[in-house]
Image (cartoon, coloured by chain):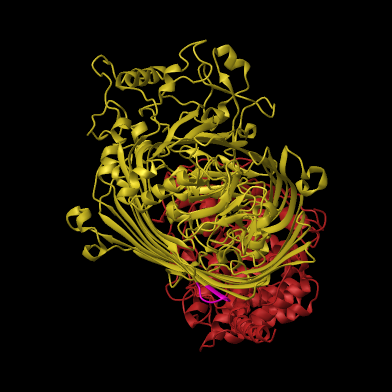
Chain colours: A red, B yellow
């Protein structure tokens, strides 16, 4: 037995060595692969920059926010070919939308995709150090704020996650954060961006300090109706921006021509505080509208079967109503630059076109497709940049904050009149509530066709009077997509009254 | 000469001893290959007197008398009794008994006697492989093991063969785990002559392989030498010719022209062939592409052994030319092998083996739109043999198949070393430790050249710029096992075997691809990237690398009481890097039990029942093959394109949503079986009832919440463990073997497997689609709850509309593409809503057979032997998809029975060039592909030993055989047995390369 014992000792030693060397779970971690994937990226400045491009990319899909936001308002009707052409648009126009709406689902999916891409970068923000990283982080946080604010405007409380991607299962555990928490995150992101960005971006199209200030001013303004302290905050940040002297209204200096504001030559101009960039240099298809590098909204609101000068044809969605056309005074230079009277245009130029569904005779001229050599499907790749935040918007928001916050009607009037002046209109002299109404009216006219109106009405409590079919307490928010409610398995409740 | 002397001595000895009461008997014992057997027990029946044979198989037993019976017994051979009539020299030939209850069967990390096995294990013996004489080893499993289905992907030489054990349960990977002498291997490159036996673990017995065992396990044991045997040199060779096993009847030129005329006329168009009188039969492109092709095989083996060393070395060479494309689709396999076993000391045994394989293969375009056979079937017979379709009459895809073959240039080479080294350590007789490493190192290179060629304007196969694609691929693996086995019997009734250990597996490799443009002289001779000069804007090269590792621990306890109550339990813990760190460890338990009733008192003395065992098993197994890092980690292949400074810029973004929790497929297997032997072991019946529930199937594209970012460009839905399937069935095999007399022996084997397959659930999505039908049509195959895996989803038909009145009385079919007219297919309004539309699609068949069967017959009469192997598959459907839906292509001859007016046909619709709904995917295109195939018939003759011994040959057998002699089927296509092997999308026929019929003549020679 002694013999065996000694043998067993060797054996145990042998087994021990094998176990120590071969059996540790480390063996499974040391796999040797050339594989750059989501978990081992962010090893250089270039990696961060590339990931940032990925976040910017999603901005292009927000065309639907603009288009559908405008359709939801009293500025325009749905249009299109028929009552069943893009049924989701038609229902929102009629205020008959339900949780089953592909286009609302797109807004949910695409803006959350933007949040996810931003959070991917932010999740790894500490992995690799390099000079200038804070600029990339600041831009990323600006973009996260942009997408999050869109989601908040459309859907109200939403799930949020600090600097980390959502993972499978989060939809069942992370609740819809109260609006205050969502706002807190947006504000924190924008304050960081303001602190770390310059007024001039390293490349045209990237977010600037001004963009972050303007968006923060807007975010504060949205909270002003419930808590007037926010008017103070809003006015402060917006006036900081105004006083920076970095921007002016296009057409008021040098040889600028106001008529070119929405033409290609007016893109990324001095009035552009934040502008979403598009191009027609890459083709696109209906299978993936969010993949287009063009502004899909532009082709969608083009004149149906149009043949004639200047413009290209489109699908005749989002047609302005007579009322908004008539609201412009005859001598308002903005009227004919904002809204195309197609009959007058056809008479004048001999252009031909077809009448679509809910034809009003008007088109959203700011974002009509201009003749250009974009690639096919040409309706999906129109290169018109979307002027997400214009200096005119900033001036009007500042005016509103100053007036409604009871801070300074005189400065409010100055900003308002600066905008009116460019349009060739006389100054207003009113104060108090009359000034508020004047600012509201000016906002509607100045920004018609740009997707802001519906949310302005809702935040100021005027939507129910203005929009046929709008039920207060229901349509203030859009419904959470039904499948999302189902995916959450009871974690998320539907918005009220849907 | 020596033997002859022996015989003489024995004869004289016999005569001399005749006169005494008792005498001495001498003899020699060999196996059926005339190899001497060492250690055979020779006993006088009912007495203790006896002896054993020596190294040369000789024995001598004194003091025997006439009338006494000698028993010859040897493990692995059928015992034989001989009644002594005198002291003649006894030349005894023992028959191998592959079904012996004492036979040792490999069951994974050990062996077990057949009588003690409690799981469902089939064994295919070396003898069966020898008889079947397969070109590839997979073919030896078809029809020889119950529950195993072998599906060739093509009849092309060297083409891949898929194996399914007890049906398919996964939506992705269904092939079994293959282990060669314990290490991970590959059946595809193995030389069948190197295989000694194959064990197939079909139920929870395979749970010892845990995460890799769910699809069943095939254990290959390669040939070794035998201890104490003289060196033997064996040569096996054959040569033969091959021809197609089927041609599809097609229209000749006149029939074709008349049909096309009719189709045009039916659409009110001018006749394209106003004069058909001198068209004759035209060109038969099908005949032109099929050749008779040679095949030749050589195998040489030297084996033997001494007291402490065994050895076996061998080499082989196989050359097979294709029946389509001849040397453009050929296959060469050369192998060399050695196997060495050494007993180093009392306590240490060492063994090593290595196989080198070289494969050289060329191939033609097959099984798809645009394949050679697809073109041969669709090329109009009015074209001359060398004509091209220069007017584009046949659409953009159909080209002259002969020109296509002539312009096909490719070559594939594989070099592989695989083998193992093992050290056994036996500190005490009851305990054995095994440490072994198996390895497989493969490198392959491929090259294909596309010359500048034009088949006519607009043809998709035109090449305007020559290019050569080359690749180099390395695939390596090792399997390291360390385990111990303790076996002992306590108090004479408790028999215990305990096994425990670990396994480490690593699979790694890489690949490199590149393309060179502008090949000098537009010639294959110069087709190499080194000679190309062209540049190209795109990326002309690519590479990949992978590294998959598994670490496993396992234990098994086998216990039996009185040798008749058997139970075993197994547990395996696996960790696999195919899954994310948070979900890569799994535990796989199983239990098996058996009861040998024939050992009980009430059966012990039965004359009818020789052996009876009931057994059952239950276990949890896994399939990790479906997994991969791409599921738990996100690739950065999302679209990230924006416009900065007015220019497009590209960044990086997340691709498909990862699922860190993605895990293996989990299988629960339950099996009840009975092993019964009757009439003194002549009849052997095994029956099994089984069920497998496969859960957590990894399903791609399951919709998830938008907050995960799946809506982003280039992102997408994740792959989630979301599906469940069930396979249940019954299988049995029956063997009957008998010796009528010393000269005539025969045996029959029959096995059948009845299988029911169903998808139980797909969570999160309604179905997964797969496969292709026609051009631009929806995917025809589906994986959907309540239906068989990969069932065909389309319209049900109800004959042909005979009159306009019938059309008018039927729900509108306009939604399928055109209003119906008399002569069109009538579709069934399945949902009864008064209109035929996509909602009326339903289950119209599936590619999974309901029953598979094998019938094997074997006769031996004197020196003659005859075997035949037949396989049948019933209830499998196939989609006829080799017809191009284009007005001017040639057709299958069944269209001669088409509808041409009321009452003419209720099966084949009218022909017209106009729009019809007849192209919609319906059961008109789904055929019953049930078949029975005579796989092998072989007749052999062994020359008498005494005629050979003086030329130093101990055995010479010559034989003739036919492979794939005939296939009984109603299926109209080339091969009802072929399948792409896809779980979803299998059973769709683009014109499979038919399996060849092979006429062989061969020789088995032993020195």
Q: Which residue is nearer to you in this view: B231 or A255? A: B231
Q: Is residue A485 magenta?
A: no
Name the residue located 61 percent from the left edge and 53 percent from the top edge: B103
Name the residue located 51 percent from the left edge and 40 percent from the top edge: A354
Provide residue B935's location: percent of width, then percent of height.
47, 37
**Horizontal placement of B200 versus B639: left or right?**
right
The span picked out in magenta is B343-349
Provide residue B158's location: percent of width, then percent of height.
39, 49
Q: Which residue is nearer to you in this view: A181 or A90? A: A181
Q: Is residue A359 above or below residue B487?
A: above
Provide residue A321's location: percent of width, then percent of height.
63, 50
Provide residue A52's location: percent of width, then percent of height.
53, 74
Q: How many marks can you see?
A: 0
- Report whether residue B762 is seen: no
Q: Which residue is nearer to you in this view: A30 or A397? A: A30
**Horizontal placement of B571 versus B79: left or right?**
right
For the N terminus of chain A, the image quarter is bottom right
The residue furthest left is: B521
Q: Is residue B838 above or below residue A297?
A: above
Q: Which residue is nearer to you in this view: B76 or B715? A: B76
Name the residue located 80 percent from the left edge and 75 percent from the top edge: A227
- Report whether residue B927 is seen: yes
Q: Quadrant of residue B734?
A: top right
């Amino acid at each position: 037995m002694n013999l065996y014992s000694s043998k067993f000792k060797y054996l145990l030693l042998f087994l021990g060595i094998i176990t120590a060397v071969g059996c540790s779970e480390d063996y499974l971690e040391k796999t040797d692969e050339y594989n750059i994937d989501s978990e081992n990226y962010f090893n250089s400045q270039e990696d961060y920059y590339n990931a940032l491009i990925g976040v910017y990319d999603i901005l292009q899909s927000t065309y639907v926010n603009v288009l559908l936001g405008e359709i939801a308002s009293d500025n325009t009707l749905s249009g299109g070919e028929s009552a069943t052409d893009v049924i989701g648009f038609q229902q929102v126009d009629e205020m008959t939308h339900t949780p089953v709406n592909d286009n609302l689902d797109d807004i949910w999916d695409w803006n959350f995709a933007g949040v996810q891409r931003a959070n991917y970068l932010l999740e790894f923000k500490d992995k690799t150090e390099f000079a200038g990283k804070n600029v990339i982080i600041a831009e990323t946080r600006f973009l996260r704020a942009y997408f999050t604010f869109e989601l908040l405007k459309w859907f109200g409380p939403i799930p949020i996650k600090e600097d980390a991607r959502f993972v499978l299962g989060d939809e069942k555990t992370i609740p819809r954060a109260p609006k205050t928490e969502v706002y807190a995150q947006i504000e924190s992101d924008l304050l960081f961006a303001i602190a770390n960005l310059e007024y001039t971006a390293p490349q045209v199209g990237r977010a600037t300090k001004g963009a972050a200030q303007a968006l923060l001013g807007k975010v504060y303004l949205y909270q002003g109706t419930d808590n007037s302290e926010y008017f103070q905050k809003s006015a402060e940040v917006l006036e900081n921006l105004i006083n920076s002297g970095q921007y002016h209204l296009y057409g008021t200096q040098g040889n600028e021509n106001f008529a070119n504001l929405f033409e290609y030559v007016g893109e990324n101009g001095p009035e552009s505080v934040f502008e979403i960039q598009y191009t027609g240099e890459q083709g696109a298809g209906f299978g993936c509208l969010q993949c287009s590098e063009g502004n899909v909204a532009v082709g969608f609101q083009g004149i149906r079967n149009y043949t004639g000068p200047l413009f290209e044809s489109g699908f005749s969605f989002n047609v302005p109503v007579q009322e908004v056309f008539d609201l412009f005074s005859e001598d308002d230079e903005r009227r004919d630059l904002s809204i195309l009277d197609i009959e007058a245009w056809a008479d004048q130029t001999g252009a031909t076109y077809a009448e679509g569904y809910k034809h009003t005779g008007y088109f959203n001229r700011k974002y009509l497709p201009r003749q250009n050599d974009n690639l096919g499907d040409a309706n999906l790749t129109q290169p018109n940049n979307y002027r997400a935040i214009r200096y005119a918007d900033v001036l009007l928001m500042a005016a509103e904050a100053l007036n409604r916050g009871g801070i300074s009607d005189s400065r409010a009037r100055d900003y308002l009149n600066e905008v009116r002046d460019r349009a060739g209109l006389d100054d207003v002299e009113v104060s108090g509530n009359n000034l508020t109404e004047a600012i509201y009216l000016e906002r509607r006219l100045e920004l018609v066709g740009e997707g802001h109106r519906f949310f302005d009405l809702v935040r100021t409590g005027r939507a129910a009077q203005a929009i046929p079919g709008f039920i207060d307490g229901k349509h203030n928010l859009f419904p959470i997509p039904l499948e999302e409610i189902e995916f959450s398995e009871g974690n998320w409740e539907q918005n009220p009254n849907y | 000469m020596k033997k002859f002397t022996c015989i003489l001595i024995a004869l004289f000895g016999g005569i001399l001893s005749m006169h005494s009461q008792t005498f001495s008997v001498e003899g020699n014992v060999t196996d059926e290959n005339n190899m001497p057997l060492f250690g055979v027990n020779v006993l006088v029946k009912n007495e203790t007197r006896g002896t054993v044979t020596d190294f040369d198989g000789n024995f001598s037993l004194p003091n025997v008398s006439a009338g006494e019976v000698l028993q010859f017994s040897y493990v692995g051979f059928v015992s034989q009794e001989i009644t002594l009539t005198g002291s003649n020299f006894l030349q005894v030939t023992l028959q191998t008994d592959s079904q012996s209850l004492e036979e040792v069967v490999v069951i994974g990390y050990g062996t077990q006697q057949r009588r003690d096995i409690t799981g469902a294990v089939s064994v295919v013996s070396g003898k069966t492989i020898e008889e079947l004489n397969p070109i590839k080893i997979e073919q030896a499993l078809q029809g020889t093991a119950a529950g195993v289905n072998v599906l060739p992907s093509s009849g092309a030489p060297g083409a891949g063969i898929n194996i399914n054990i007890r049906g398919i349960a996964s939506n992705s990977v269904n092939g079994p785990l293959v282990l060669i002498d314990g290490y991970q291997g590959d059946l595809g490159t193995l030389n069948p002559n190197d295989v000694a036996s194959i064990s197939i673990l079909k139920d929870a017995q395979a749970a010892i392989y845990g995460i890799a065992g769910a699809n069943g396990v095939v254990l290959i044991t390669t040939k070794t030498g035998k201890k104490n045997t003289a060196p033997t040199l064996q040569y096996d060779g054959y040569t033969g010719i091959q021809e197609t096993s089927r041609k599809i009847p097609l229209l000749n030129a006149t029939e074709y022209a008349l049909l096309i005329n009719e189709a045009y006329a039916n659409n009110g168009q001018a006749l394209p062939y106003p004069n058909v009188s001198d068209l004759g039969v035209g060109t038969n492109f099908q005949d032109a592409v099929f050749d008779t092709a040679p095949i030749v095989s050589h195998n040489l083996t030297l084996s033997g052994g001494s007291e402490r060393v065994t050895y076996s070395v061998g080499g082989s060479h196989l050359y097979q030319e294709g029946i389509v494309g001849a040397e453009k689709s050929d296959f060469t396999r050369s192998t060399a092998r050695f196997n060495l076993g050494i007993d180093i000391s009392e306590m240490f045994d060492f063994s090593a083996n290595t196989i080198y394989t070289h494969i050289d293969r060329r191939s033609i375009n097959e099984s798809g739109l645009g394949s050679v056979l697809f073109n041969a079937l669709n090329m109009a017979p009015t074209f001359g043999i060398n004509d091209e379709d220069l007017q584009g009459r046949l659409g953009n895809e159909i080209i002259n198949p002969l020109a296509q073959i002539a312009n096909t240039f490719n070559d594939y080479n594989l070099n592989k070393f695989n083998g193992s080294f093992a050290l056994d350590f036996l500190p005490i007789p009851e305990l054995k430790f095994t440490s072994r490493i198996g390895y497989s190192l493969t490198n392959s290179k491929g090259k294909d050249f596309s010359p500048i060629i034009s088949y006519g304007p607009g043809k998709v196969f035109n090449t305007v710029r020559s290019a050569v694609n080359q690749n180099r691929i390395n695939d390596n693996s090792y399997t390291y096992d360390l385990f111990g086995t303790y076996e002992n019997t306590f108090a004479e009734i408790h028999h215990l075997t305990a096994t425990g250990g670990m396994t480490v597996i690593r699979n790694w490799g890489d690949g490199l691809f590149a393309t060179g443009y502008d090949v000098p002289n537009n010639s294959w001779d110069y087709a190499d990237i080194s000679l190309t000069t062209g540049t190209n804007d795109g990326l002309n090269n690519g590479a990949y690398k992978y590294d998959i590792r598994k670490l496993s621990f396992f234990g098994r306890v086998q216990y039996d009481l009185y040798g008749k109550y058997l139970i075993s339990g197994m547990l395996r813990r696996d960790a696999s890097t195919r899954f994310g760190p948070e979900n890569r460890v799994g535990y796989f338990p199983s239990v098996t039990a058996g009861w040998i009733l024939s050992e009980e008192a009430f059966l012990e003395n039965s004359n009818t029942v020789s052996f009876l065992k009931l057994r059952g098993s239950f276990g949890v197994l896994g399939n990790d093959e479906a997994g991969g890092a791409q599921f738990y980690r996100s690739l950065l292949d999302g679209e990230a394109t924006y416009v900065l400074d007015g220019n497009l810029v590209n960044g990086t973004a997340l691709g498909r949503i990862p699922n860190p929790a993605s895990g293996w497929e989990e299988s629960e297997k339950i099996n009840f079986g009975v092993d019964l032997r009757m009439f003194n072991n002549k009849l052997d019946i095994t029956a099994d009832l089984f069920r497998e529930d496969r859960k957590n199937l990894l399903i791609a594209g399951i919709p998830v919440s938008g907050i995960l970012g799946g809506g982003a460009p280039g992102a997408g839905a994740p792959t989630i463990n979301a599906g469940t399937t069930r396979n249940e069935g019954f299988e049995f095999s029956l063997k009957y073997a008998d010796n009528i007399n010393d000269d005539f022996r025969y045996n029959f084997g029959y096995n059948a497997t009845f299988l029911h397959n169903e998808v139980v659930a797909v969570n999160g999505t309604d179905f997964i689609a797969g496969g292709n039908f026609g051009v631009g049509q929806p995917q025809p195959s589906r994986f959907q709850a309540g239906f068989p895996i990969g069932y065909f989803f389309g319209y049900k038909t109800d004959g042909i509309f005979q009159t306009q009145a019938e059309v008018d009385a039927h729900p509108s079919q306009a939604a399928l593409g055109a209003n119906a007219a008399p002569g069109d297919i009538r579709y069934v309004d399945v949902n009864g809503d008064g209109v035929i539309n996509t909602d009326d699609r339903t289950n119209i068949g599936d590619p999974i057979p309901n029953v598979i069967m094998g019938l094997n017959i074997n006769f031996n009469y004197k020196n003659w032997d005859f075997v035949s192997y037949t396989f049948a598959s019933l209830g499998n459907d196939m989609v006829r998809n080799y017809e191009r839906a284009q007005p001017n292509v040639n057709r299958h001859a069944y269209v001669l029975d088409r509808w041409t007016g009321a009452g003419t046909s209720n099966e084949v619709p009218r022909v017209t060039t106009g729009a019809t709904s007849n192209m919609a995917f319906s059961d008109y295109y789904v055929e019953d592909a049930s078949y029975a195939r005579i796989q092998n018939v072989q007749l052999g003759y062994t020359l008498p030993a005494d005629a050979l011994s003086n030329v130093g040959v101990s055995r010479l057998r010559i034989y003739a055989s036919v492979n794939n002699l005939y296939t009984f089927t109603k299926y109209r296509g080339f091969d009802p047995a072929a399948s792409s092997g896809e779980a979803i999308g299998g059973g769709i026929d683009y014109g499979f390369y038919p399996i060849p019929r092979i006429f062989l003549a061969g020789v088995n020679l032993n020195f």
